[in-house]
């Protein structure tokens, strides 16, 4: 699961949840992919060795490798999102660290926060939102459908435990 509950602080009855998008391609996997694409793209060029056509087509092949490199790096940078939800008996605080731009903040009284799971009508099925403090904010929109369902169940249980204590 691309989210983790940090160890709860039993003295202050606080819990912290960290959420992030999937990152399935490691740096090593990225290097292997670019290298294998480059080597496979070179195969048709073996028949052109010693001709001027090789030098005419080589920049286009290198542009393709550069384009794939740029697209994968851009995707990786765009997925550097971190959401941190802090649950306390009196305050609930959500901060979303975006890859570009400033962080987004939301805070409300824990007792009045309403957790909702929207099966339809949101940008994705089973959309999880927190409503309170005059605003409704999404949480974990980058998770899969099953992960959002599990997040909703875990979050509602944690909220219930914290408000009871």
Image (tube, helix red, strand yellow):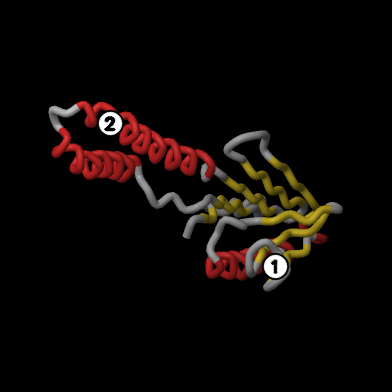
Element carrying mark 1: helix
Point out which mark residue 15 bears. Answer: none
Q: Position of residue 95 (x, y in %)?
A: 67, 44
**Figure check: 151 above or below 89:** below
Residue furthest out toward the right: 134
Q: Position of residue 142 (x, y in %)?
A: 57, 56
Element carrying mark 2: helix
Residue 107 is left or right of residue 80, and the answer is: right
Residue at left 75%, top 47%? 106
Residue 12 is left or right of residue 49, and the answer is: right
Query: Residue 31 versus residue 38: which sits nearer the camera?
Result: 38
Residue identified by numbered label 2: 58
From mark 2 to mark 1, how far is it between C-alphas?
A: 62 Å
Query: Residue 73 versus residue 23: which sits nearer the camera?
Result: 73
Residue furthest out toward the bottom: 119
Query: Residue 89 versus residue 64: which sits nearer the camera?
Result: 64
Residue at left 57%, top 45%? 82
Residue identified by numbered label 1: 160
> For residue 158, which quarter of the picture?
bottom right
């Amino acid at each position: 699961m691309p989210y983790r509950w940090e160890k709860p602080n039993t003295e202050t009855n606080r819990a912290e949840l960290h959420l992030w998008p999937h990152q399935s391609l490691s740096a090593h996997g990225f290097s292997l992919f670019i290298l294998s694409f480059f080597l496979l793209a070179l195969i048709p060029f073996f028949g052109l060795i010693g001709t001027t056509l090789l030098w005419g087509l080589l920049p286009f092949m290198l542009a393709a490798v550069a384009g794939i490199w740029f697209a994968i790096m851009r995707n990786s940078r765009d997925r550097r999102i971190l959401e941190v939800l802090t649950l306390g008996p009196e305050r609930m605080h959500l901060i979303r660290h975006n890859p570009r731009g400033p962080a987004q903040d939301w805070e409300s009284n824990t007792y009045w926060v309403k957790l909702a799971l929207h099966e339809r009508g949101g940008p994705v099925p089973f959309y999880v939102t927190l409503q309170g403090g005059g605003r409704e904010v999404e949480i974990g929109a980058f998770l899969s459908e099953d992960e959002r369902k599990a997040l909703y169940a875990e979050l509602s249980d944690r909220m219930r435990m914290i408000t009871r204590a």
